[in-house]
């Protein structure tokens, strides 16, 4: 320990005091300044953490949070989701976002807190796969709208069999992180959805639900196309949610100009594409509908208990304190997954802790012994019914729909576990046709990232998906690859992580943290796809080479025939037959290059 | 609006009900699950957001948070900081971190909240440059220790003229985000600091303070060397804080093996160096002292009011509601910087709002008018005394001390403003000598990142500093540069951002968010350094070329002399003189290449 030496007597205090700069504080004056920081104040000042750092990204984040909530609600209630997203420009730099769903609706008393209180929700305290998990997103979107326009979040919601819908206008008191209700009325409302074609003409009859929720927020925003746009989010969202019908409309005050189509300044990704083939801009409004491709509802994933191997010592102590069980053995068996009564008894025996002891009275050193015993006990891996992958078939269908390619492949890995949390990795790869103008063969490959079926458009550099793709040796699969970088080629790689808890690198949920186990699973799946790609590329190279040889020989067949004609003294007809025969032989021969 | 079309009558409900998957919820059952999430629960589950995602990074983050707090406290109290950092391995994967300072100490009543409550502190609610700003860091380190070892944070603190020091052991109740005090005793304690040399021998007399704070936390941790290590943090910390004396000691249970020296698995940065020249490992303990290079205390930066051009509409409305002034004019003049009484009157006039109106009664549309009027009013830029740069002299001194180079330059830009927050960018560049083994000429340049004098070691890819360096066209300054990447060469680039509010991309404070204004300032400073570097590189290239030509001509001088000898029929002595003369001429001539 520094500090145990014999001291020198001179205290520097006097010397230092003389040089003390003006404005110096004391322990007492500093104490007087200490105070609580509300979580809303914190995120208001740090709104870039939530994805609201620019007008363009703010719009995307708001749409993403609203759509995530709608999809989660529909799926949890077993309803095939139908959602409309409306963006309406109401001033030069201001948009009104309205997202409407056919979900189960929200009980009136919960509306204010769900939409105007950070860290409030149903998804945080359970282990089950869902898009939302933090209880922050939609309230943050409302807070951003309030900050930039001073307006309120407007919610309209009707639950099944309800007399009427509730319309509530709510703001957030950021000092207290509490909702302030500005108005609360009843209204006759049923959400209506109308599919449109590329020209914006209604297709078929509208669909009406007798329940659902609509949220509307005004905010400072900028609408631009490109790879990080709402357009792209909507499109990718439709790809990975084939059971979703999604209607998307944008209304602008003026004609969309070059500015709308240019990538945002400060955005380093130079690969901004113009993949708006489906959204035909006609004057002031553009519309598109993505209709569901399947009526099959994804299986509702199970909720699980924590797996003992993913629980840390401090958490174990907390769980023993909080358990409803009256014995340690009971707590282990009932609050954890994969622990039977017998296993619980074994753990207690190994730890030398009385299985009948009261869990709340377990001492620190006993908890350590239990923790150690748990680590040493072989347990089944966590149950994996709690994650619901997209599946190889749907991934292939999605890629085939969106990318004209010569080769497609998909891999859904078996579920695995990081820090006790089950997760599952899925990869799709497409090798684009050479005529595809969006995917160039001398650009880095395009990586589409998804977490629990949500497209991730920002912060690719911070994401373990990018790291995993860069970390694979693509040269051995036939693609060029600069050191530590994305491989180069006309390739689209789609990566999906499904988990009961996706470890995002920030509250804006744009990038997946680099846990070793996650990168390892991604790497294995990428390598499998890489091997398949290399088989395709080798075959193609082989075919091209064979074609080249064949062409080369075809070139000489007439000369060969002429030579034979002269040597054997053949007539023109015989010469012609030789040419034909040789060509036929050539076609039949498999040229082993 | 989608939703205004005539509806079709058939409700899909019955059809969907038939296919509804098992486990479906209703609005009511979902409402029953909604609940509050405490901020500690949130960050416990998301501890990677705070920088505690691996044992190695956890140790670094804990040291960083403790050292940041110590430095802030010393500087605020006008004390020249002396700090010791002790890392003691207490089990295979467990370390005890103890950080002790000679700061002003902490008033007893504040200790539990400061160390065991997230979002509590003195730095969040003011605009003044400091290392800490969130009120999360040190409590998070304690929470991480508690989670992984079940132990408490131990604080020892003595304020000036106090009878004794307080020793408090505290844990955090994560459900409530509240401190739980485990013990509270008085003790006679004065922090003692002993400088050591490279062999660990005490140098000079120990220094004793009669006030200070020591915090000790046990945690799961891994000690490893390299570019993202505690060693590196300590070293860089000493470089950018020349007024700091820093003592650093590591005690390991066994000899440091290859594992300690290897970069962490899963860490993608392959550039992990071995810059441990100053920390001599001798058996089980290594020690080093960095003594202060200056006794001059950095100026205590001023606290400022928000600048009106950086305040958004919602914030303006909130400030009008909260003001102590009784009139709108008064509120504008007193709560904002750069608004005189006259300017406040002008803004009211322009907005058509009564300057004598009560601020709390300003309606939404009036606030909008005021907001617009503020944007249209020319105002002085925010005061910049609130940021305290390192300065070009100190940056050059720091670089010269650490990097053997042929060329150094530094630029401190004038302060600028993003979102109303003053900030200042400083850059230092060194072109290393070819014999430096750590800095290779075919590797990407090494970028050292700092924010408010704190070294940033993680997440370089997410940081605007990296983006700014990649965004400059270094080819025009004579360095190779792959597209969109770091330039290549034996160059170290140091970038420091000083601000009243550094916009970090996550709570772990590892990377600066990419605000346009920040990137622009960095770019200008980098370009200035680049121009100077290119002058140096051109000169060097010129010199090399001239030397080459001279060598070339020297080669021919004897032949020339021999030729002249034969033509003019000279003797050997005359020939020799011609050679000498020609060589002299060559040396005098400036060869313009």
Image: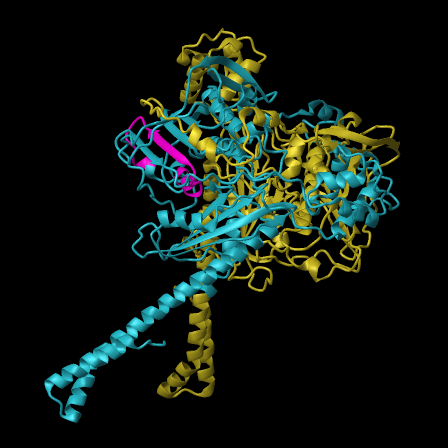
Chain colours: A yellow, B cyan
Q: What residue do we see at 54% from left, 42% from top?
A: A426
A589, B241: nearer the viewer: B241
Specify whether B509 is left or right of A36: left
Visible in this render: residue A330? yes
Instruction: State the residue in front, B44 or A395.
Output: B44
Magenta residue check for B101: no
Q: Is residue B480 visible?
A: no
Does the magenta run of residues contain B253? yes
Q: Does residue A257 sit above or below A88 in this rendering?
A: below
* Range drawn in magenta: B234-260
In the rendered image, the vertical position of residue A437 relative to residue B449, given as above or below: below
Residue found at the very far left of the displayed protein: B572
**Image coords of residue B175 (percent x, y):** 60, 21
Q: Position of residue B48 (x, y in %)?
A: 52, 34
Residue A209 vs residue A505: left or right?
right
* Image coords of residue B529 (percent x, y): 47, 58
Residue B517, given in percent of the width and then of the height, sits at: 61, 52
Q: Nearer the viewer, residue A414 or A286?
A: A286
- Position of B297 with respect to B400 (left or right) is right
Q: Image quadrant of residue B121?
A: top right
Compared to residue B419, the image places residue A422 above or below, namely above
Closer to us: B496 or B195 = B195
């Amino acid at each position: 320990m520094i500090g145990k030496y014999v001291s020198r007597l001179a205290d520097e205090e006097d010397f230092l005091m003389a040089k003390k700069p003006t404005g110096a504080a004391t322990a007492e004056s500093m104490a007087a300044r200490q105070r609580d920081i509300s979580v809303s104040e914190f995120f208001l000042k740090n709104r870039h953490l939530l994805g609201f750092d620019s007008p363009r990204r703010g719009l995307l984040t708001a749409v993403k949070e609203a759509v995530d909530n709608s999809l989660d609600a529909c799926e949890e209630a077993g309803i095939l989701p139908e959602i409309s997203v409306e963006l309406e420009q109401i001033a030069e730099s201001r948009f009104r976002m309205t997202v409407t769903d056919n979900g189960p609706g929200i009980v009136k008393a919960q509306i204010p807190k769900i939409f105007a209180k950070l860290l409030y929700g149903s998804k945080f305290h359970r282990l089950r796969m869902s898009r939302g998990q933090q209880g922050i997103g939609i309230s943050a979107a409302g807070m951003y709208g309030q900050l930039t326009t001073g307006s309120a979040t407007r919610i309209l919601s009707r639950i099944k069999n309800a007399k009427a819908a509730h319309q509530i206008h709510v703001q957030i008191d950021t000092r207290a992180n509490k909702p302030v209700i500005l108005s609360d009325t009843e209204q006759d409302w049923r959400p209506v959805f109308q599919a449109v074609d590329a020209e914006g003409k209604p297709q078929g009859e509208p669909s009406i639900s007798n329940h659902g929720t609509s949220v509307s927020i005004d905010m400072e925003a900028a609408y631009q196309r490109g790879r990080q746009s709402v357009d792209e989010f909507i499109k990718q969202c439709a790809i990975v949610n084939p059971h979703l019908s999604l209607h998307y409309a944008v209304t602008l005050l003026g004609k969309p100009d070059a500015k709308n189509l240019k990538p945002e300044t400060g955005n380093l990704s130079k690969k901004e594409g113009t993949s708006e083939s489906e959204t035909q801009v006609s004057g002031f409004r553009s519309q598109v509908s993505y209709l569901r491709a399947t009526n099959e509802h994804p299986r509702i994933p199970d909720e699980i208990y924590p797996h003992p191997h993913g629980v840390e010592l401090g958490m174990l102590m907390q769980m023993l304190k909080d358990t409803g069980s009256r014995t340690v053995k009971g707590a282990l068996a009932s609050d954890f997954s994969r622990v039977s009564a017998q296993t619980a008894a074994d753990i207690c025996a190994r730890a030398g802790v009385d299985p009948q002891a009261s869990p709340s009275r377990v001492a620190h050193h006993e908890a350590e012994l239990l923790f150690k015993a748990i680590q040493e006990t072989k347990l089944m891996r966590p149950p994996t019914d709690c994650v619901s992958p997209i599946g190889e078939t749907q991934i292939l269908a999605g890629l085939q729909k969106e990318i004209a390619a010569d080769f497609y492949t998909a891999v859904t890995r078996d579920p695995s576990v990081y820090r006790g949390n089950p997760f599952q990795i899925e990869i799709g790869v497409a090798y684009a046709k050479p005529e595809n103008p969006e995917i160039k063969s001398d650009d880095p490959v395009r990586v589409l990232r998804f977490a629990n079926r949500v497209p991730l458009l920002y912060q690719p550099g911070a994401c373990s998906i990018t790291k995993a793709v860069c970390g694979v040796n693509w040269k051995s699969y036939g693609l060029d690859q600069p050191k530590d970088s994305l491989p180069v080629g006309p390739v689209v790689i789609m990566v999906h992580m499904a988990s009961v808890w996706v470890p995002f690198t920030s509250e804006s949920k744009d990038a997946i943290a680099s846990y070793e186990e996650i990168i390892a699973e991604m790497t294995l799946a990428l390598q499998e796809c890489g091997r398949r790609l290399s088989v395709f590329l080798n075959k193609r190279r082989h075919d091209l080479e064979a074609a080249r040889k064949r062409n080369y020989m075809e070139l000489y067949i007439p000369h060969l025939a002429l030579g034979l004609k002269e040597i054997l003294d053949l007539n023109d007809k015989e010469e012609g037959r030789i040419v034909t025969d040789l060509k036929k032989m050539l076609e039949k021969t498999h040229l082993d290059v």
